[in-house]
Amino acid sequence: MQKYNLLRHRLIPDLNKLDVYRKNGGFQAYHKAVNAMHPEEVIDQVKASGLRGRGGAGFPTGMKWAFVDKNAWPHYVVANADESEPGTFKDREIMEGNPFQFLEGIAICAYAVRAHTAYIYLRGEFWQIAADLDRQIAEMEAEGLLGDNLFGSDYSLHIYTHLGAGAYICGEETALLESLEGKLGQPRLRPPFPPSFGLYGKPTVVNNVETLANVPLIIANGAEWYHSFGTERSPGTKVFSLSGNVNLPGNYELPLGTTFRELIFEYGGGIPGGKDIKAIMPAGASSSLIVANDGALDTPMDYESVPQVGAQLGSASIIVIDDSVSIDWLIRKTLHFFNHESCGKCTPCREGTYWMRHIADRVNDGQASWEDVELLEDVAHQIRGKCLCALGEFSVEAVISGVERFKGDFQAKVHQQQVELPELSTPVMEIHE
Amino acid sequence: VNSLADSFSVEIKKILEKYPVGQKRSAVMPLLFLAQGQDGYVTRQAINEIAEILEISATDVASIVGFYTLYYDESQGKYHIQVCTDLPCALRGAEEFLEKLCENIGIRVGETTPDGLLRIEAVMCLAACDKAPMFQVQSGDGLVYHEDQTVESALQVIRHLKD
């Protein structure tokens, strides 16, 4: 059953209004943290909850907060609201429907790492959401929830929005920080990681919107309560963005560990047009392709189980692919995306995505031989493990898994091309003597 | 004379207050949006003026315009019809939708109508995958999403823009 911890607005009308949010328990966790808890206690609570980053990497949130360098100041909190992974549309719904829970999460995180300034970096297309958040932040300031000397303490906090301008790479945390500093959105060489060297070179926590929206509930209800959802190592609920060839696409908030079958067939209503499911991409375009057999469908969607069927859970953007789709077309689509979005900083990604795209175009157009497919695989393997950030690394996932697991689709394209070749029965050139 | 600084003194002050002292450069993206909102694209003059306000080089400002896809350095159609054709939308018929829309408007992807009103583009994921086919209309006034579209409903939106 869906359990609305993050998408509570689906049950409570007007939850995006401050008074309604307050009436439904809003800001109690924030009050509790600032008035009755030491920052370290807040971090310990989040650690104990087992909350893991919802942006894709699944890194333990409390541990990230604890890494913030206490010998360098000031500290910053940055909310990553650059949601741009094809197939992902969960942060948008949280910010539109339940914005104060997200803002409260930022405030608690900032208190825990003793930051006095937090930024929300939103993709440029979320222009209206940013305007709404600016208004909601102003309301919180007017209510004494943000600003100086909060709740009679010496703690102060200001939250600001910052709009990106159409660059997928800015979802990568160090590229995001560069962009926020007014530079090109290109990733930094790591280490050092943001908790020691982040925004303006200062210790910084970068967390995804959904991650932060979990925090108020953890502080209010405790780590044990949080463990009542999900699995032992992947506790909590997760917003799964379901898209592609499925009857009822949308966001579904379910405990981690729910199976692919439940999500796609029970909640998503199955595959349209009486077709069969062929493949699943569980982490958007950055995902490996899973062959959708019974074993895969019965796999629990959590951070440990999905790798056992050869993919990652990532941001849990589940793209469903039916049996009318040819995988050589699919990787052509993902490669056009990654080639367009490559920032150009590191050579394997900049050149590699370009060449993979061109080979994939040729294959899909039926103008390639099997050697081209092998070349595509070869280029993908050359890129793997050599990029500055995850964008380049992720660009090869669908390619390598696609060719390996759906070889027949590629063989058919190559075969088709051979059949269509004109027969060279007449000389191409006339030779004049 | 810095006409951007003169016309938007209140807005610029508010933007600069978001960032720490000595980190004015962070304001380059919001200032570019401000300038583009006024002129429809980022003019050469705006680049120089933003550089002056932020005390960075015009080349630094221009590099930002070039890097990010939502900034334009030349005059565009008044309304950009931007259809997402990325994988999840394509699986729900977005490519066919775009093709038919173009046929009906009588221009190809990347072209602008002769009256300079509409420009049609295929763009990357807009975080609306469950509501495909969809497009956004980008203009000086901001961005508006149109979701769960058919060719007919899209043409109606476009007729509305023309009026």
Image (tube, rainbow, N blue to C red):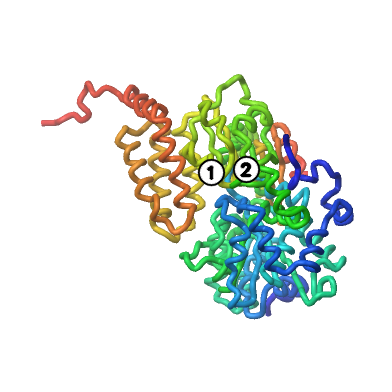
Q: Residues within 10 Å of mark 2 (few under 14, many from 20)?
A: some
Task: Return the x and y of residue A66 as percentages of the image width and height.
Answer: 61, 65
| Residue plotted at (79% across, 45% down) | A8
The answer to which image quadrant residue B159 occupies is top right
Q: Is residue A257 above or below residue A430?
A: below
Please give left or right for residue A100 compared with residue A242 in the image: right
The answer to which image quadrant residue A63 occupies is bottom right
Question: Would you name the residue on which mark 2 appears?
Answer: A231
Q: Circle 2 marks a residue in which chain? A: A
Please give left or right for residue A94 compared with residue A207 in the image: right
Please state which of residues A409 and A418 is positioned toward the viewer in this rendering. Answer: A409
Residue A273 visible? The answer is: yes
How many numbered discs, if any?
2
Task: Return the x and y of residue A17 as percentages of the image width and height.
Answer: 85, 53
Amino acid at the residue labelled 2: Thr
Pointers 1 and 2 in contact (C-beta within 8 Å): yes
Amino acid at the residue labelled 1: Glu
Task: Return the x and y of residue B51 as percentages of the image width and height.
Answer: 60, 75
Q: CA distance from mark 1 to mark 2?
A: 10 Å
| Residue plotted at (24% across, 24% down) | A424
Q: Circle 1 marks a residue in which chain? A: A
Q: Is residue A104 above or below residue A91?
A: below
| Residue plotted at (49% across, 41% down) | A307
Secondary structure type for disc 1: loop
Name the mark nearer the viewer: 1 or 2.
2
Task: Return the x and y of residue B63 as percentages of the image width and height.
Answer: 53, 66
Question: Would you name the residue on which mark 1 appears?
Answer: A304
The quarter of the picture where the N terminus of chain A appears is top right
| Residue plotted at (38% across, 40% down) | A359
Outermost top residue: A274
Residue B120 visible? The answer is: no
